Amino acid sequence: MAANSVSTPVPVAWYPTLAVAMVSVGLMLTASFFIYEATSSRKSRSLAKEITTGAAASVVLGFGSLFVLLASGVYV
Amino acid sequence: MPPSRPTPIVLLLLFALTAVSSSPLPPEDGIRVVSAEKRIDLTGPIVKVFLTLKVENAPGASDASQVLLAFTPTEVEHLAILKATRAEGKRKKKAYVPLSVEASDLAATPNGARLYSVLLSTPLKPGEKTTIEVLYVLTHTLEPFPAEIGQSESQLVYFRDSAVLLSPYHCLEQVTYIKMPSNRIESFTRVDPTSRAGTELKYGIYSNQMPNTYLPILVHYENNRPFAVVEELARKVEISHWGNVQITEQYKLKHGGARHKGVFSRLEYQSRPSMSGMSSFKNLLARLPPRVHSVYYRDEIGNISSSHLRTDSHKSELEIEPRYPLFGGWHCTFTIGYGLPLQDFVFESDDGRRYINLTFGCPLLDTVVDDLTIKVVLPEGSKNPQPSVPFETEQHIEMSYSYLDVVGRTTVVLKKKNVVGEHNVPFQVHYEFNPIFMLAEPMMLISAVFLFFVACIAYLHMDLSIRKSL
């Protein structure tokens, strides 16, 4: 039975770097979301722009928090 | 054929036993044991017996496909493992082929002796000879006598066995060697010819023994080796395809030798170590796989710092020292945990299924485990788990719940009683896993964060003012 080792999708050595990078990008996107909300008036707000910024921020933050968990030893 | 050089007691015993053994012998009654050499190793808390049997199939009898081994009922109760191999090929090409051994219900044997049959890979033709090597391990058969000792006394134990091999066949020539851990032997039964050379006792050579002969002997000797008995061991192996196999082991350890009586004087124990606490132990060694990380050793109170971890490229050795030395009858409970890299243990086989390759048994060296439970927690979304263990275990499947779980993780539970070091062999658990299920965890986190953003947007779009603003 030829056996290949099962490898992880992302090399384990990258976990801490990826965690920090993704969380910081995610927080920057969150900041731009809230800045947009604060600076625009009720009439000139565009729902599409809000949802895209929110979705992008949540994807990056979601992966970032997963890598934070993996880098700190909680192998989910 | 009468035995040569018998003593009167021996003759009486023989007569009594052979009178009872009017049972029909199994079909392979053409087999005779030409020579038998039994080496009993009593240097530890368990009894290891190496038996070399040279058997011959009588000319004119039928082909023999199995060789029977007999054990007394007490031996069967304490039998931990029974292995047989046969040397095949000559000289340089000698290969030891393992043979399967099964419990056999053939033929009523005198005094309730139980038979195990060694199935030969190729049947033994009439007139042919072969050599079979058998190894068996007996646990909890050494009886401490005196049963209770003080702190500065040595531990003496009884060992009971037979001077001649209990076998359903005629035995032409046999000898038994018993190896002790030290020179102090209080007493031993003499069944001529018996001799003693330092730490080794020799019972033999006995010729022409009838089938089912049993000559009980009793050896009383000193054994100060650590009698470490793990009463319960619960091992949990958690597989995460993100790169880690986490193993957590919970031990209930006990000193299974002569019970300690009287007071324990720490002063005497530490000031005169050669005269005090000879039968106690304070260190245990655990052999772990190489490239182990995040090893911890703790109990209910907290972390135990008296431990050492030495790693090299082939193995890691963890030496643990419990909070107090263990004397006879004392218990101690602790947990050991460690993490291992995924690529060393989980592999993908040709048919697309993944499997994990682990070592069965207890990593602590020279211990007996009374009750072992191994739980292999497979990642979420695994299907069709299938364990393959080289010996008998109780198996069942259950569900465990852990971090970021939706449906739960399939867990394979294996249980076995009476586990010794010879059981530390690899075993596999096969399962099917679609890598797309690994995305379930980040998806859960993303949807949680996205829900927060949607809630913000909804709040900011809601108009809760009572008066319409211009």
Image (cartoon, rainbow, N blue to C red):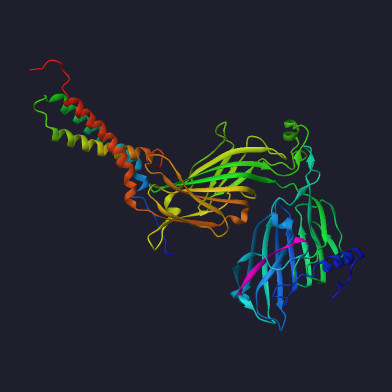
Q: Is residue B325 above or below residue B145?
A: above
Quadrant of image for the C terminus of chain A:
top left
Residue A50 horizontal/vertical position (percent):
16, 33
Residue B41 in view in this figure: no
Q: Residue furthest top?
A: B467
Please report the bounds of the magenta region as a residue range. B111-121
Closer to us: B218 or B30? B30
What x and y, as percent, mark residue B217?
82, 58
Residue at the spot 92% in from the left edge and 65% down from the top edge: B8
* Residue B16 falls left or right of residue A42: right
Quadrant location, the N terminus of chain A: bottom left
Does residue B254 appear in the picture of this structure? yes
Residue B221, magenta (yes or no): no
* Dominant secondary structure, magenta: strand
For this orientation, the residue located farthest to the bottom is B60
Q: Position of residue B137 (x, y in %)?
A: 68, 57
Q: Is residue B261 above or below residue B75?
A: above
Point out residue B412 in the picture as x, y percentages from the top left corner: 48, 50
**What's the residue at 22%, 28% (across, down)?**
B456
Q: Work out whether residue B227 or residue B462 is closer to the camera in this orientation and state it.
A: B462
Give the quadrant of residue B406: top left
**Which of the pair A26/A53 is nearer the observer?**
A53
Q: Is residue B296 left or right of residue B109?
A: left
Q: Is residue A19 above or below residue B132?
A: above
Residue A58 found in image quarter: top left
